[in-house]
Amino acid sequence: MLSKISKRTIWIIFISLLIITVSGDFFIHRHSNFGIDGYFGFPALFGFLCCIFLIILSKILGLFLKRQDNYYDE
């Protein structure tokens, strides 16, 4: 298990990367193709929502693909 110092360090790294990703919209001019992708912070929000979708999808698939604990004993 990770110690408290390393957990805190990982959180600091993740939050720093999030700030860098969102603040990149201040410096990069993006050409929107669909209208919604021109909003501030859209790439970060889209990535976050896709990550949540994949986690939920994996949980649902796990319900159907899960085997019993004694599957190999039979």
Image (cartoon, rainbow, N blue to C red):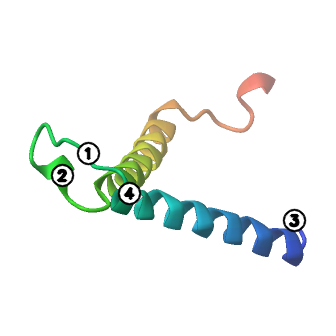
Residue 28 x/y as whole percent? 35, 51
Q: Quadrant of the N terminus?
A: bottom right
Location of mark 3 (residue) = 2
Dot 3 or dot 1, earlier in sequence:
3
State how far apart marks 2 and 4 are (Cα). 14 Å
Q: Quadrant of the C terminus?
A: top right
- In the image, is 8 to the left or to the right of 21? right
Q: Amino acid at mark 2?
A: Gly
State how far apart marks 1 and 4 are (Cα). 10 Å
In this rendered view, identify the residue nearer to me: 36 or 68: 36
Q: Nearer the viewer, mark 2 or mark 3?
A: 2
User: Which label sits on residue 27?
Assistant: 4
Dot 4 or dot 3, earlier in sequence:
3
Q: Residues within 10 Å of mark 1 (few under 14, many from 20)?
A: few
Q: Amino acid at mark 3?
A: Leu
User: Which label sits on residue 21?
Assistant: none
Dot 2 or dot 3, earlier in sequence:
3
Location of mark 2 (residue) = 38
Dot 1 or dot 2, earlier in sequence:
1
- In the image, is 14 to the left or to the right of 48? right
In this rendered view, identify the residue nearer to me: 55 or 8: 8
Provide the secondary structure element on which disc 3 rests: loop
What residue is rendered at 35% in x and 63% in y?
26
Q: Amino acid at mark 4?
A: Phe
Q: Nearer the viewer, mark 1 or mark 2?
A: 1
Residue 10 x/y as whole percent? 74, 65
Up-down: is 25 above or below 59? below
Location of mark 1 (residue) = 30
What residue is rendered at 10% in x and 40% in y?
34
